[in-house]
Image (spheres, rainbow, N blue to C red):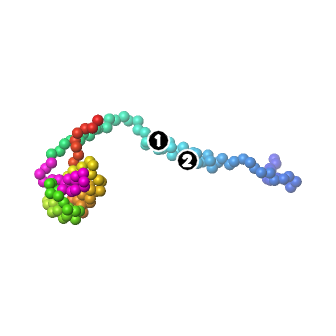
């Protein structure tokens, strides 16, 4: 039995032009295992019919605070115009102290700037009111 340990003294060194594929195979096996584990999570085989929710029209309670924002960005509590954000916060703090706390319902015009409605949400948050809702038009658009 003979064993070849290296090149003989009279032979020249030659370049090995083969690629070591062992690390490549290891990485591919790990990726295959990851894909086999995650694919069943993404696709489910059980067919279910998910429920559909309809927007139920709710009646406004008399104790709810209605804040309106018109197209020009003016803010109103009920029908009373509000001078600024500070005035709105001060008026809402009165409602925030009531027990139980009333819900604030915001009626924003569809053409109003987001900034105006954002100022109302900011004021409601600063006043400490936790219940906020948005009033929308219940008509269905096809």
Question: What residue lies at 26% left-to-right and 48% top-to-bottom?
Answer: 110
Residue on which disc 2 sits: 30
Question: What residue lies at 27% left-to-right and 38% top-to-bottom?
Answer: 141
Residue 112's place in the image compared with 91, above or below, is above
Residue 100 image offset from top left, x and y in percent: 14, 57
**109 or 21, which lies in front?**
109
**131 or 66, which lies in front?**
66
Q: Secondary structure at mark 2?
A: helix
Q: Is residue 19 toward the left or the right of residue 95 in the image?
A: right
Q: Is residue 79 toward the left or the right of residue 26 in the image?
A: left
Q: Is residue 42 toward the left or the right of residue 30 in the image?
A: left
Residue 96 in sight here: no
Ranked by sequence position, the earlier of labels 1 and 2 is 2
Residue 11 image offset from top left, x and y in percent: 85, 52
Q: Which residues are magenta?
A: 60-76
Residue 75 counted in the magenta span: yes
Categorize mark 2 by other alpha carbons within 10 Å: few (<14), some (14-19), many (20+). Answer: few
């Amino acid at each position: 039995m003979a064993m070849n340990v290296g090149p003989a003294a009279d032979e020249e060194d030659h370049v090995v032009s083969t690629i070591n594929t062992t690390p490549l195979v290891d990485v591919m096996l790990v990726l295959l295992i990851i894909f086999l584990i995650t694919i069943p999570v993404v696709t489910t085989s059980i067919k279910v019919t998910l429920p559909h929710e309809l927007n139920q029209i709710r009646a406004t309670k008399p104790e709810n605070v209605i804040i309106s924002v018109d197209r020009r960005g003016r803010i109103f509590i009920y029908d009373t115009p509000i001078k600024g954000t500070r005035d709105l916060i001060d008026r809402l703090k009165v409602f925030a102290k009531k027990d139980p706390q009333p819900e604030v319902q915001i009626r924003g015009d569809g053409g109003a700037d987001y900034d105006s409605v954002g100022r109302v949400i900011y004021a409601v948050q600063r006043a400490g009111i936790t219940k906020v809702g948005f009033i929308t038009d219940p008509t269905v658009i096809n």
